[in-house]
Amino acid sequence: MERLDKRVAGSLTRFYVVALCVVAMLTVSGLFLIRRTIRNLNHDSRLVNVAGRQRMLSQRLTKLAVLKINGIAHRDSVSFNSLLTLWKDSHEDLVSRRLPVEKGFVTWKSQPLDTMFRELAPVFDSIYQNLRIISHDSVDAAAKQRALAQVLVNEPRFLSQMDRIVFQFDKESFERLQNLERIEWILDLMTILVLVAEGLLIFRPVVNTTRRVVRMLTESEDALQLSNQRLKEANSQLLETQKELLRLEEEKYELQLAEDRIRAGALIEGQEEERKRFALELHDGIGQMLTGLKLHAEKLKAVQPHDEKHQKRFEQLVTLIQDIIQTTRQVSFNLMPSVLSDFGLASALKLLCQQTADVSGIRILFEGETGERIMMARPMEIGLYRIAQEALNNAVKHANADLIKIKLEQNKNRIVLEIADDGKGFLISNLKSEGQFLTRNGMENIRTRTRLLNGEIEIISKVDSGTRLVVQVDL
């Protein structure tokens, strides 16, 4: 039984392939004939247009000849000789059965048309030669009048013959179209016969086999539906489990983020406290001792030693102590500037710009109101100051800038801190792909402090076009 089914299936497959090949061959043949006929019709339209243009050119040339001989002015912008050359070339193309087009030449085979062009040749030659006489200025007026008379006599004959040629073109084109229609009918009839044979010899046995297979499938449908129901229930339980796992993962991730934020906040807060303590120790401890040391050195300097070398050493010692005191004050200021707690963020940033400009030699400007203190929480004030300090250090060390601006403004309930420079800039993609770049330039520290303040950060930079960093924090 299985072998019989295989033989039947193989026989049906062969019949089906043969039928498809025949239908495809008939279809391709029809398309080929249609395309060729359409191409021929396009060529015929081109020929008819050129033949019609010959009639128009002959009439136009005759009119220009009459106007030229009688000395009547006209508005025709094309020269008489160029029209005459075009008329002659087009006629020769038609006679030679090779009409130039964009992609080659249009040719045709028609004995009646060749006969008509041979009959037209004497008339055309006569008109052309007489028009040549009229076009020459050296010919006398009497000869031109005789030439014009010949043109007027032969022009109606030329127009009549060209009408016959145009009608013959149209007749042959229509005959080709009728022939295509007959061939198309034959191909359609053959296609229908092939399809009918395909339905009787192929599709009918296939339908019977399909009915038998459908009956067998129907018998197993209940079992399949039961299995599907069980799989659906299992799938639902799996989806619920996946959702629960996803929710737990999201909660775990949120907790981890909160833990990281708290840890970072505590670390930064500890750093700020340590900086504050160390700054006080420098200012109150080491700073006072250095001041006392300076006073003692100045007293010793007041005692004029007899040795000039000792006097120079005392002067160098006093200068060195003064430099150490200044450096200690600067370190203490960088750790925790007292002006930040005494006068607020704007005054601290202005002083930071002045001191950094004096040390670096770069022009650093501050824009902001220092007269009235912006009221904000102490951690926010310290955080924004550290962000500005870090960004300013980055610009001084890495930007090669000539001008750096720090701008602080209050927009309703939002503080906007902007640091901009005209330096070499960098690619923003480096901030996302190169961890070493982040560490080296302190950008990660700036972002961490901004996140701890629940603020927003925007970095705009282009190579050789400077960098602009904007931090916005809500009060």
Image: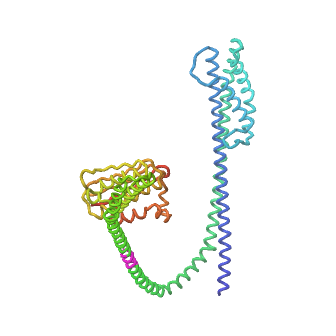
Q: Quadrant of the N terminus?
A: bottom right
Q: Quadrant of the C terminus?
A: bottom left
Q: Quadrant of residue 107?
A: top right
Q: Is residue 155 left or right of residue 303?
A: right
Q: Quadrant of residue 111?
A: top right
Compare residues 424 and 302 and report the one nearer the observer: 302
Image spot of residue 445 (x, y percent): 41, 64
Compare residues 353 and 381 and report the one nearer the observer: 353
Identify the residue at horizontal 40%, vertical 53% (top origin).
305
Q: Quadrant of residue 195?
A: bottom right
Question: Image height check: is 58 above or below 435?
Answer: above
Q: How is the image coloured?
A: rainbow
Image spot of residue 330 (x, y percent): 37, 58
Q: Main secondary structure of the magenta part?
A: helix
Q: Is residue 113 magenta?
A: no
Compare residues 123 and 301 and report the one nearer the observer: 301
Write down the region rendered in magenta: 246-255
Identify the residue at horizontal 73%, vertical 41% (top origin).
110
Image spot of residue 29 (x, y percent): 67, 57
